Image (cartoon, grey):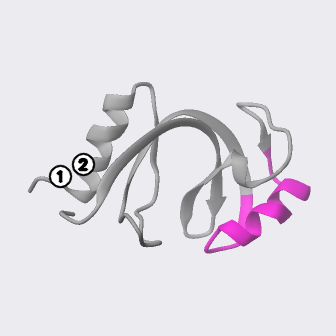
């Protein structure tokens, strides 16, 4: 990951369940109100989430915390967000463990 930078941020996200696993979609991508802990198995929010997921979403929960990911400056390349975590350092450590340390 030598060409990628590690970024961390605190935000709320939709933890979306699909037939192939879970995906995180930051809440600020959908221009709608949300409540942390909110869950839904059908409705308008799931319809809006389709454009951000690789598979059709069937359920979501709104989560909040620290997230981290690697991103290549000047490019659209980035890893998936890792989180939510209670602290910024936890998110960074999880990201390094999952994708490797940029200093390696």
Q: Is residue 42 magenta?
A: yes
Q: Residue 101 bears which disc, if any?
A: 1
Name the residue beneath numbered marker 2: 96
> Is residue 23 shown left or right of residue 1?
right
Q: Is residue 80 magenta?
A: no
Quadrant containing the C terminus is bottom left
Quadrant containing the N terminus is bottom left
Residues in magenta? Answer: 40-58
**Identity of the residue furthest to the left in this view:** 104
Whole-percent x, y for residue 86 in the image: 44, 25
Whole-percent x, y for residue 14 in the image: 67, 48
With respect to residue 32, does 17 lie above or below? below
Q: Nearer the viewer, residue 20 or 73?
A: 73
With respect to residue 82, does 86 lie above or below? above
Residue drawn at the location 71% of the way across and 47% of the way down = 28
Within the image, what quadrant is residue 89 found in?
top left
Whole-percent x, y for residue 26 in the image: 63, 49
Pointer 2 with pointer 1, Cβ within 8 A: yes
Residue 1 in view (yes/no): yes
Residue drawn at the location 17% of the way across and 52% of the way down = 101
């Amino acid at each position: 990951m030598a060409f990628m930078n590690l970024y961390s941020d605190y935000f709320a996200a939709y933890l979306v369940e699909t037939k192939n696993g879970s995906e995180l979609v930051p809440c600020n991508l959908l221009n709608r109100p949300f409540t942390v802990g909110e869950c839904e198995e059908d409705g308008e929010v799931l319809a809006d989430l389709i454009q951000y997921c690789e598979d059709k979403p069937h359920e979501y929960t709104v989560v909040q915390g620290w997230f981290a990911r690697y991103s290549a400056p000047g490019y659209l390349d980035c890893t998936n967000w890792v989180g939510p975590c209670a602290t910024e350092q936890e998110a960074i450590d999880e990201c390094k463990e999952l994708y490797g340390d940029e200093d390696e």
